[in-house]
Image: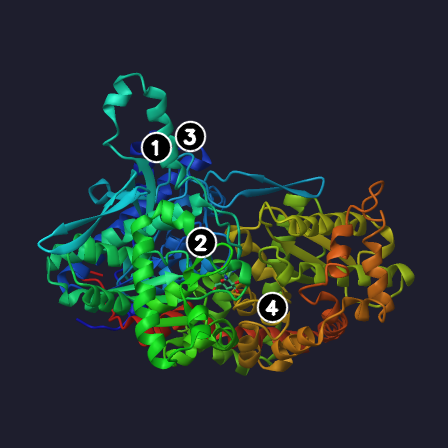
Amino acid sequence: MTTQTRSASSRKAPATSKALQQKILHHLHTTQGTYPEKASALAWWEATAAAINEFVMAGLTDTQKTHSRYDTRAVNYLSMEFLMGRLLSNNLHNLHLFETTDKALAALGQNLTDILEQEPDMALGNGGLGRLAACFLDSLATLNYPAVGYGIHYEHGLFEQHFRNGRQIERPDDWREYGNPWEVCRPESVQQIKLYGYVETVYEDGRARKVWHPGRNIKAVPWDIPVVGYNGANVNILRLWESRATDFFDWDVFNAGGYVDAQIEQAEAEAISKVLYPNDETEAGKELRLIQQYFFSAASLADIVRRYQRAHGDDWTQFPKLVAIQLNDTHPAVAIPELMRILIDDKDMDWNHAWQLCHQVFSYTNHTLLPEALEKWDLHLFEKVLPRHLELIYEINHHFLTEEVEQKWPGDDGVKSRLSIIEEGARRMVRMGHLSVIGSHRVNGVAEVHSELVKSDLFPDFHALWPHKLTNVTNGITPRRWLKACNPRLAELIDRHASKDWPVRLDKLQKLTDLADDARFQNAFMKIKHENKEELADVIKALTGIEVDPGAIFDIQIKRLHEYKRQHLNLLHILALYRRLLENPDHDMVPRVFIFGAKAAPGYRLAKDIIFAINKVADRINNDERVGGKLKVVMLPNYRVSLAEKMIPAADVSEQISTAGKEASGTGNMKLALNGALTIGTLDGANIEIAEEAGEDNVFIFGLTVDEVKALNSRGYNPYDYYLNDAELKAVVDWLDTDYFTPGQPGALSSIKHSLLDGGDPFLVLADFRSYAEAQLKVDARYRDRKAWARSAIINTATMGKFNSDRSIQDYVDRIWKLKPYPRDNA
Ligand code: CR6
């Protein structure tokens, strides 16, 4: 057996369009119970998905057989979020069935593009962290690494966003209201999950044993979503757990007239997987959230242990050789004490042996330095929900502090209290980050600068204690979804000018740098960008009624709405441009369309106010004749993966303007640059590495650096210093206080001004404003030189090879997971 990724030429020939046509018709008849003249677009989508599923399932069973034949080491990727988006188009591309299906449907009088639009996004995540998990699954399958994604089968994914009078309104997302053709329920792998109750110490054979008497039992039902690798590679699974009431509910209560109580119990059990918490980067601290975390971690571990024991029984020697478990942020950190509980309480293992196994299998990825996102649980809440786990955490902590910390820093109580899993204070807290670091053999950050800050600022004592534990794996994105599938014209141009295997060897795009000055190639490249902009203009018109000119610069900021991401910095600059145009209608600027997409956490007031402000400013500017079409502002509603796929190929400018030190990595920055957008950004997260790859000439860097931010903050930052010394800045900030953008409602936008001045401007918006505005002038100047712009755009596409998520996965494999690839038999 070879351990290489299969090349394009060695894969089996895909189906003919005739054969596919038959399959689709067959499913239209037999699974949809309808016929072509009558079928709705949704039925066509279902039938097409069912036809493609035949190939998917064949790949899945072959992969599973291969894994069990070779008893493979696998990574289990535990994540509360998987932002998968739509699957049909992706599966068609990865199976090389896109054109064939297009033809097959055309012969049936259907249009594939319209049919693809029927699929609801699988939005089981908030943003970057969840989308990263989805890209990683794509790469793991493509590289033939044995892997299982484990998460939660949320009934409602991230809320649907609507605007009412410019304000964000949330509506529940119902992605599987009418079923979902990709998922397979696996009743044979159901798990029972315990919660609440108390712990009893029983003495047996002169030994004390702990017995947890749970107060509740919940059933965890697994749903498998196949993850199709590119080029007929492996098909792995994403296993999502749904919560249900257990079967052993109390029939006596039920019969005694407790019908309603029984129903309530059922509703409570089902609440666990009911809804995704819509907070990006903030910890909710709610009991239900802790239960969600435990629920899916415990179900996943039980499944991992079951799979292991099926082959190895009670021989635990192979466990760390076959099992790697990655904690995607601290959300599944409770898996660490849960594995200890299984090994010690259920499998009768001694502490040291159990801890050794634990430590060998777990590793943890940190995705943020923001204090509000570093999870801590109130100790009493934790004890109520997971009494046995709290005991185990105390014991882990005791061993750690008395053995490791005391050894290194004898008698130092300061360092002990800093490193303790338990935070002492008015309310005692369990620090999940500490637990994750202590229980893992490797901890990584997600971009170079972020990983350095994890070492120096977040976990300096841990770094001193274990200098080799902390490492970096820079994030990546799958070029299959984020170039091949979403930007077919550019993909085709690259096929012709670089090499055809770029979707698995993204570094081969480098060849395009040779063509960066070639006038014909430049024209072809820019023509594609223009066509993509025309398509996005149609989408904008359809969604908002706003007409935009594809000849203008399309300047795009897409990401969650957060103060640290500074959409309001972008907004202040838009106001400055508007003001310049009002003061001088002949003001010379390249026409620009600022396009936003962003959801705000429903409870995040200021973020919602910023959305409102963008919408109100957009209303005013877009309807002001005086700007002469030079300026347009668009906020697209309900930003999500499938909308990103339409926006990214059409971007000229990519806004990556977070306060330095705040954005751990960013991954939208990579997608936009790969599709030929020029970044305007701070030296933050992966922007730094993007600038290194593309060259500083091909990006527009501005603003304070991480060190300058630190220095300014320690000197004492006063936003008034900037506000009072920059007339234009002062004017636009003050503008927010008038009713110019909200006629009849003065003060409707004042919260933004307030946060920037009396609120202390925690993200240094005013400090970076001037440097940002100057960088924007450079963007304008570069765009006037069409050749120079085209050159930079091409170089951006050409140099993004590093950000292939295949490279990230290979880094994880080399540094952390130590997996071997196993191409499936029969492929
Ligand atoms: N919000 C980071 O903020 C990073 C992703 C994936 C984030 C972002 O910079 O690219 O993770 N962090 O690593 C968290 O979700 C905690 C994010 O998506």
Quick check: 472 above or below 593? Answer: below
Q: Which of marks 3 and 4 is nearer the N terminus?
A: 3
Amino acid type of the residue tagged 4 in the rendering:
Ala
Look at discs 3 and 4 and give the one toward the viewer: 4
Q: Which of marks 1 and 2 is nearer the N terminus?
A: 1
Q: How far apart are marks 1 and 2 (CA)?
A: 48 Å
Side of 377 relative to 824 (left or right): right
Q: Distance between the residues labelled 3 and 4?
A: 44 Å
Quadrant that contains the C terminus: bottom left
480 and 218: which is toward the camera: 218
Q: Quadrant of residue 154?
A: top left
Query: To which residue does mark 3 refer?
Result: 37
Quick check: 710 above or below 338? Answer: below
Q: Which of marks 4 and 2 is nearer the N terminus?
A: 2
Asked if disc 3 and disc 1 are in contact, CB closer than 8 Å, the reply is no
The residue at 48%/50% (across/down) is 285
Q: Residues within 10 Å of mark 2 (few under 14, many from 20)?
A: many
Asked if disc 4 and disc 2 are in contact, CB closer than 8 Å, the reply is no
Please state the horizontal and vertical placement of residue 85, each as a whole percent of the image. Answer: 45, 51
Amino acid type of the residue tagged 3 in the rendering:
Glu
Residue 677 shows which numbered tag?
Answer: 4
Q: Distance between the residues labelled 4 and 2?
A: 42 Å
119 and 236: which is toward the camera: 236
* Residue 62 visible: no
Residue 32 shows which numbered tag?
Answer: 1
Look at discs 3 and 1 and give the one toward the viewer: 1
Please state the horizontal and vertical placement of residue 563, each as a whole percent of the image. Answer: 64, 59
Query: To which residue does mark 2 refer?
Result: 377
Q: How crowded is mark 4: few (under 14 residues within 10 Å), some or many (20 or more)?
A: many
Quadrant that contains the N terminus: bottom left
Please state the horizontal and vertical placement of residue 128, each as a whole percent of the image. Answer: 50, 59
* Residue 44 visible: yes
